């Protein structure tokens, strides 16, 4: 064994993501330590190559230099690997054990971790504690990942953009990577998407329109921006359209955390529930106004399971069975001359006798609903005289929005100063600052917080007075929708979704209309 030659690979890895001390674990320090060992050892270790993965996590082995090392092992170029310590090779407990205890011995590979006193050729003391060290390294990775996620979440909650790429329709601000600005080249596409949704088109129909017009998908557009030339256009996905139509980023509210990694060892991402999204209001310029966005949300719910054919019925998605609460479907008779309604739950469960058909002529129902709305709203408009109140309400609403933005700014300032206080407290504990500086900075930050809290309280009092006049604002919006409705000979689904919440059909064919606003 003494005369055997060991073809040696030096493996070096560094990753901020693992919580590495970037100074003590630097590439240079690792290299110097390994090369010094080669010079001082009395064994026949022949240096073959150096394999460096700079910026790659130890949670998995999907690293370019590690893959190159494995190829050289397969080609019998390498039979010995040296690292500074176990964590440099990796931190995943399961994979590390698999390599050291099974794969390396089967391939005749000698592994040396200098600082952990491990050499698989000999019974070194470090091997007795191998499992404990592997578990500790894995725990350290998990703990570090948890801390990093907390920091990232706090930054997102403060309104900082932390994505590697801005959402489609935006780009990172040139002077601040944590802010986004509108990408004017893409703005018209976003506007077109929401306008198509307002026309009642489903995400699938919008995706087909964009695909037919050869509009580059977000991924293709991102590649084009990076200089990759391609004449191929991928098809738009309905899921992508739906995610964009429900993203408040397009009205100026930065929405992050819509996806997250499965766990700290996996790169796979999963969608997160809406209640877990991190939304910071009024952080940037919106492409779409809030009224348009809210209308689209209501339309998406009404269009949820509607068919993909072009001629969607006006009341589709609005009609509900009063007895069972399920949707009332709309279909054509076998000769195609008559449209009729039916309880979808009854149709799918008819053999169990659940619910009843609720069958009625659709054209008569639509005409009756529209006639009732016209009559009701015409009387409402004729008998309502509050033009002065409408104008006053608009002025109040403009003021309210402005004051809400001011409150949001103050909230962010207060949160920022609180984080500063936490930071200087840590600095004091770590002896980075003395007590005098700590007290001076703490007093300064707390005084600013008190000033901002007082300003916020005054603004909130003013807002509460404005909110007392909310009934006037609602009347203004109601009148606007009614006049828009009455100006059309036949309403479209965009207008209808603003007027009607649902239409209940009883077993005895009684029709009840529920509106989205109050009639005074």
Image (cartoon, rainbow, N blue to C red):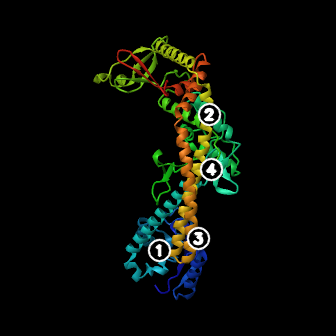
Please provide percent x and percent y for residue 365: 46, 15
Using the image, determine if residue 456 lies above or below residue 234. below
Q: CA distance from mark 4 to mark 1?
A: 37 Å
- Tag 2–tag 1 contact (CB < 8 Å): no
How far is disc 3 from disc 2 in space, using C-alphas? 64 Å
User: Mark 3 falls on what kind of element?
Assistant: strand
Residue 160 lies in quadrant: bottom right
How far, Cα to Cα, is label 2 from label 1? 67 Å
Which of the two discs, 4 and 2, sits closer to the camera?
2
Q: Nearer the viewer, mark 4 or mark 3?
A: 4
Disc 2 is placed on an element classified as helix
For label 1, the residue is 86
- Mark 4 — residue? 166
Residue at (59%, 30%) from the top-left corner?
A: 198
How far across and how far down the image is residue 303, in percent? 50, 29
Quadrant assignment, res 137 = bottom left
Tell me, yes or no, whether the two marked residues, 4 and 2, touch with CB atoms within 8 Å.
no
Q: Check disc 2 and report the residue beneath it.
A: 394
Q: Earlier in the sequence, mark 4 or mark 3?
A: 3
* Residue at 69% in and 45% down: 183
In this view of the protein, which residue sits in the foreground, 516 or 390?
A: 390
Of tags 2 and 1, which is closer to the observer?
Answer: 2
Work out how far the residue at label 4 is from the one at label 2, CA to CA, in angstroms.
34 Å
**Disc 3 target residue:** 52
Q: Residue at x 63, y 30 (%)?
A: 391
Crowding at dot 3, Cα within 10 Å, few <14 / some 14-19 / many 20+, comes out as: some
């Amino acid at each position: 064994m003494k005369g055997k030659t060991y073809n040696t690979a030096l493996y070096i890895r560094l990753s901020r993501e693992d919580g590495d001390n970037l100074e003590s674990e630097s590439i240079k320090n690792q290299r110097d330590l390994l090369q010094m060992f080669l010079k001082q050892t009395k064994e026949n270790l022949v240096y073959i190559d150096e394999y460096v993965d700079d910026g790659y996590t130890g949670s998995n082995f999907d690293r370019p230099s590690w893959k190159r090392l494995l190829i050289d092992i397969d080609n019998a170029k390498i039979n010995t690997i040296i690292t500074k310590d176990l964590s440099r090779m990796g931190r995943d407990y399961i994979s590390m054990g698999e390599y050291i205890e099974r794969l390396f011995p089967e391939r005749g590979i000698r592994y040396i971790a200098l600082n952990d006193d491990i050499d698989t050729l000999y019974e070194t003391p470090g091997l007795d504690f191998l499992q404990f060290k592997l578990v500790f390294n894995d725990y350290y990775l998990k703990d570090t990942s948890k801390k990093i996620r907390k920091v990232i979440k706090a930054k997102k909650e403060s309104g900082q953009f932390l994505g590697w790429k801005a959402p489609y329709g935006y780009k990172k601000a040139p002077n601040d990577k944590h802010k986004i600005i509108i990408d004017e080249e893409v703005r018209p596409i976003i506007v077109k998407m929401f306008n198509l949704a307002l026309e009642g088109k489903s995400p699938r129909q919008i995706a087909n329109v964009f695909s037919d017009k050869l509009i580059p998908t977000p991924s293709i557009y991102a590649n084009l921006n990076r200089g990759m030339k391609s004449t191929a256009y991928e098809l738009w996905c309905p899921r992508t359209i739906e995610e964009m139509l429900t993203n408040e980023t397009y009205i100026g509210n930065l929405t992050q955390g819509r996806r997250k990694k499965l766990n700290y060892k996996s790169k796979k991402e999963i969608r997160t529930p809406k209640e877990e999204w991190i939304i910071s209001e009024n952080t940037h310029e919106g492409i779409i106004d809030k009224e348009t966005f809210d209308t689209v949300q209501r339309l998406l719910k009404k269009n949820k399971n509607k068919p993909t054919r072009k001629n969607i019925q006006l009341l589709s998605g609005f009609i509900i069975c009063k007895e069972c609460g399920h949707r009332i479907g709309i279909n054509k008779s076998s000769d195609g001359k008559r449209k009729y309604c039916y309880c979808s739950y009854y149709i799918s469960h008819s053999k169990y006798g659940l619910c009843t058909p609720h069958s009625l002529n659709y054209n008569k129902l639509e005409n009756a609903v529209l006639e009732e709305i016209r009559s009701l709203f015409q009387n409402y408009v004729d008998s309502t005289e509050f033009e002065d109140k409408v104008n006053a309400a608009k002025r109040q609403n403009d003021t309210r929005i402005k004051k809400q933005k001011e409150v949001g700014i103050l909230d962010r300032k207060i949160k920022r100063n609180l984080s500063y206080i936490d930071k200087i407290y840590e600095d004091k504990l770590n002896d980075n600052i003395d007590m005098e500086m700590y007290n001076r900075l703490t007093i300064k930050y707390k005084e600013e917080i008190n000033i901002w809290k007082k300003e916020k309280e005054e603004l909130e009092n003013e807002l509460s007075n404005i909110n007392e006049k909310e009934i006037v604002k609602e009347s203004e919006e109601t009148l606007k929708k009614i006049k828009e409705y009455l100006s059309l000979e036949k309403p479209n689904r965009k207008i209808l979704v603003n007027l009607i919440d649902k239409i209940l059909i009883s077993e005895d064919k009684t029709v009840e209309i529920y509106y989205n606003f109050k009639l005074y």
